[in-house]
Image: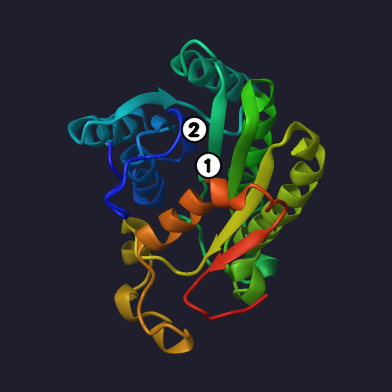
Amino acid sequence: MPDPRTDQPALGPVRTVLITGAAGGLGRAFALGFAAQGDRVVVADTNLEGAQQTVALLEAAGGTALALAANVTQLDSVTQLAADAAAFAGENGRIDVIINNAAIYATITRSPFEEIDVDEWDRVMAVNLKGPWLVTRACSPYLADGAAVINLSSATVLSGSAQWAHYVASKGGVIALTRVLAKELGDRNITVNAIAPGFTLTEASYGLIEGAAEYGVDRGSIKRASEPDDIVRAALFLAGPGSRYITGQTLVVDGGRQFL
């Protein structure tokens, strides 16, 4: 299936790509982007109906995809997810790309750090930080030689967004986890990198901030809002042949609002 971004056919054999949190938003955009390259996509989410809707979109465009219900905070759930994804891969039973996208974001209550609900703190950490660790751990036995793991962090780590301590801390932890996994998986020729998006126009973002399309645009070097495809392109690069010697890194995709 040709990639509409390049009008060129995908290169190499069909890969199996596992994407968490792909019932909608950025996760769905990742699924569409990888399917457009001809990759086989596993769409995982706690919202199975939403995951199935994503799969329907991929199949309507000629892609091959599987929807699976999974809770990234539960070891039994991600263990089954990894096994099912490997089975979907076919004869070689290998997973080539993981996109650890599942996160709590739009439903978080903004509060001073002294007032954050302890249970909400624990839920955010469980999904946003424990989740990527558990998913990668469960998938490790199935990862192909040359596989790519991509974790979703956030550019808020650089700005320290006020009244969002649990979210920012969880995404900072993702960067630290990425570096450790890069060290531990490097001898298997597996790359592990993070993407730190700026404020991106997903359904969740439109619901979170009034006037989302103009939010922060004046602070960027590129004077427009970030679209999901901007983040998808970064993931396609980090999962592709041009990044095989890049690992343990965090790619900030925010139009030049902040710099590492």
Percent coordinates x, y for residue 33 in the rendering: 36, 46
Number of the label disc, if any, that sits on residue 15: none
**Residue at the spot of label 1:** 99
- In the displayed structure, 200 sits above or below 74; it is below
Sequence-wise, the earlier of marks 1 and 2 is: 2
Local packing at callout 1 (Cα closer than 10 Å; few below 14, some 14-19, many 20+) is: many
Q: Toward which corner of the image does residue 215 lie, by quadrant? A: bottom left
Q: Looking at the figure, which quarter contains the C terminus?
A: bottom right
- In the displayed structure, 69 sits above or below 153; it is above
Which amino acid, mark 1? Answer: Ile
Q: Give the residue drawn at x 75%, y 32%.
A: 188
Which amino acid, mark 2? Answer: Leu
Q: From this viewpoint, is residue 167 visible?
A: yes
- In the displayed structure, 200 sits above or below 194; it is below
Percent coordinates x, y for residue 142 in the rendering: 63, 21
Q: CA distance from mark 1 to mark 2?
A: 6 Å
Say what secondary structure mark 1 lies in. strand
Number of the label disc, if any, that sits on residue 18: 2
